Image (spheres, helix red, strand yellow):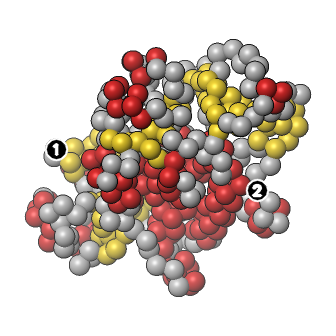
Amino acid sequence: MCVLLSACTGGKQNSFTQTGDGDMLKLKYAKNITIVRHDGYTEAVLADPWNEGQTLVRYVLIAADADAKAGSDRDFGDAVVVKTPLKKALVSTSVHCSLLNDLGKREAIAGVCDVNYINLDFVKQGVENQKIADCGSSMEPNLEKVIDLSPDAIMLSPFQGSNYGKIADIGVPIIELADYMETSPLGRAEWMLFYGMLVGEEEKAAKMFAEVEETYCKYKEIAARQTDKKSVLMDKMVQATWFVPGGESTIGKMLRDANCVYAYADTKQSGSIEQSFEQILQKCADADIWLVRYNKEGNANYNLASLAKENEKYKVFKAFKDGNVYGCETIDSHFFEDTPFHPDRLLQDFVLLFHQGAAQANGDTPRYFKKLQ
């Protein structure tokens, strides 16, 4: 159950509690990270999400200007030592570039990977003006460019059996962006506390997360009070396959928190489920509301006719017949950049669409999804 921080603790942020080994940050939702503050340094331990009970990596965060007595001369074993705040980072994902921007630290982004997939104007302009280095693919960054950049950290998304190759041998700390392996919306968002520590914005990150949590819980509570539950269909076909969120995915859990009827709510997958058109039709033909995500390339005026043009069979769905199809243009809305660390915004959209009478009493309007005409 969510607890509103402002209502229960006067707006107090996540706090540290004393343990035998230091002061541990009380994380309420994140399961794969532990943060402990010691005298002169902070330790962050990332659990291996693919191997239960094992550690993915252990970080020791030390202030860049710390003297030897504060911990910089200690032996931390196999821990990766990171001097903070980061001022010159190589960031491999659009999501984390967006978060650093939200934390007021866009200047810390010195280099990026996969620039073609980064939907942020300030990053694209920085690359074009050669103020931000384009270091190639995140799967295999350009070694020479990384060495020339001389970053104080490299922020990469891990995957099972990750092997960073030669990049791991150049002596630059690799920050493993494992937040995406959290399976609860607020669990992933809570990782912003760790990233805030890395760039010297711990208090700002704590305040931002408290606001995210409060808004998320507010809309969850609004939804929970509603007795009229709408049934919902998600997304559309990609070539011959229809991918829908699994019941244990972050979107699946948000749909549950939005108090709707979702045909795949009881599935155990934490990622997407592959379905055929016939399987979707069998389960969702009578869904009240259909949510579709698309990008604007070739779809500047996307509407119901555009959807039907992609597949005439879409017309058989009740939501299509009733005109209850809502589209999210993912590029201009920054959907994929926003929602990982601001799940409250997406839950708000869901609740506004599924429980219009109750949720729109405040005059709020959906941020991402608009009715297709």
Whole-percent x, y for residue 346 in the image? 48, 62
Label 2 vs label 1, nearer the camera? 2
Q: Give the residue at x 69% y 50%.
A: 202
Amino acid at dot 2: Gln
Whole-percent x, y for residue 140 in the image? 33, 27
Q: Which of the 4 image quadrants contains residue 182? A: top right
Above or below 345: residue 157: above
Q: Tell me the crowding category of disc 2: few under 14, some 14 to 19, or many 20 or more residues within 10 angstroms, Cα based.
A: some
Residue annotated with mark 1 = 240
Dot label at residue 13: 2
Q: Give the residue at x 52% y 34%.
A: 153
Left or right of 201 in this view: 331: left
Left or right of 320 in this view: 256: right
Q: Secondary structure at mark 1?
A: loop
Foreground pick, 125 / 314: 125
Left or right of 174 in this view: 286: left
Foreground pick, 87 / 25: 87
Foreground pick, 227 / 213: 213
Q: CA distance from mark 2 to mark 1?
A: 47 Å
Q: Secondary structure at mark 2?
A: loop
Q: Which of the 4 image quadrants contains residue 198? A: top right
**Sequence-wise first label, 2 or 1:** 2
**Residue 169 visible, this angle:** yes
Amino acid at dot 1: Ala
Q: Give the residue at x 57% y 23%.
A: 56
Above or below 336: residue 34: above
Foreground pick, 264 / 177: 177
